[in-house]
Amino acid sequence: MSLPYRLIATDLDGTLLRDDDTVSQRTRDALAAATAAGAAHIIVTGRAVPWTRHILDDLGYEGLAVCGQGAQVYHAGEHRLLTSLTLDRQLASLALSKIEAEVGPLALAASRDGLDGEVLVGPGYRVQEGPLPVVAYEDPAELWSAPLNKVYIQHPELDDDALARVARATVGSLVNVVMAGAGIVEMLPLGLSKATGLSLAARRLGLRAADTIAFGDMPNDIPMFGWAAHGVAMANAHEELKAVAHEITASNEHDGIAVVLERLLG
């Protein structure tokens, strides 16, 4: 079996993971067949390492993972952080004040840097149900007291797409703003994206954009699709990502990654 791509980059939530946070046996088998044929698999997720590690361990995944929207390159087999980029906290604070001047008060959360970085959640911030640990804070100073990879913002009335648009228009010269999922609008270091993290990880493996097929479901995957030779959007993907995809596969619930890899493996 041969594969036209030497690198398979997969987003995690809404792409590799089904809605119950598991990976189907069919998708596991397709990825195993692809790696047996000589391809490398890199998981590229918006989740920071502390929220990704348990899933990688459960998968038996020992390769490189790009976490935190590209901020972190993590060696899953060695449980080691290879690179980590932090957000300038002064710039982030300035950006927040500018957005709030436009739309009013925001609810905030933030992801602290490091292998064990906590996710801090402020008053009014809606956290999705699930097993991922968060630490509540009341004092705004607590948010800025240690290095951060990103800041999450929510608005009581604006939907995610509208909030991301306003934020990008207002502070796009200070920070990068992405919409990564329902209720997840993030401020990142300027210039950072999944593409920058993936390019770093690929270089460590001696691979290039031309070698890469990428799978994703949200607007934060757009830069990765722009970098990779071939971008595949899931059937459940955001319309903005579908618009730039080379093809659309089945949903994350219906083994969309496996459908494409099985076809390519012939």
Image (cartoon, rainbow, N blue to C red):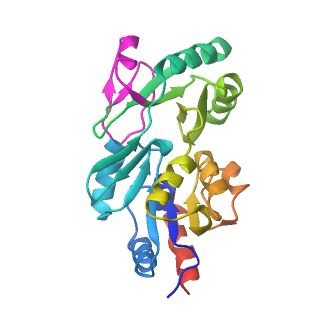
Residue 223 lies, with reference to residue 252, above or below; the image says above
Q: Residue at x 40, y 20 (%)?
A: 122
Q: Position of residue 114 (x, y in %)?
A: 32, 36
Residue 57 lies, with reference to residue 144, above or below; the image says below
Q: Does the magenta portion include 121?
A: yes
Tell me if 18 is positioned left or right of 236 in this view: left
Q: Residue at x 40, y 80 (%)?
A: 36
Task: Say which quarter of the image contains residue 61.
Answer: bottom left
Q: Position of residue 35 (x, y in %)?
A: 42, 75
Q: Position of residue 264 (x, y in %)?
A: 58, 80
Q: Residue at x 46, y 61 (%)?
A: 16
Q: Quadrant of the C terminus?
A: bottom right
Front-lying residue, 166 or 177: 177
Q: Residue at x 64, y 11 (%)?
A: 101
Instruction: State the extent of the magenta-drawn residues as a range.
Output: 119-148
Tell me if 72 is positioned left or right of 227 in this view: left
Q: Does the magenta portion include 234?
A: no
Q: Position of residue 157 (x, y in %)?
A: 61, 24
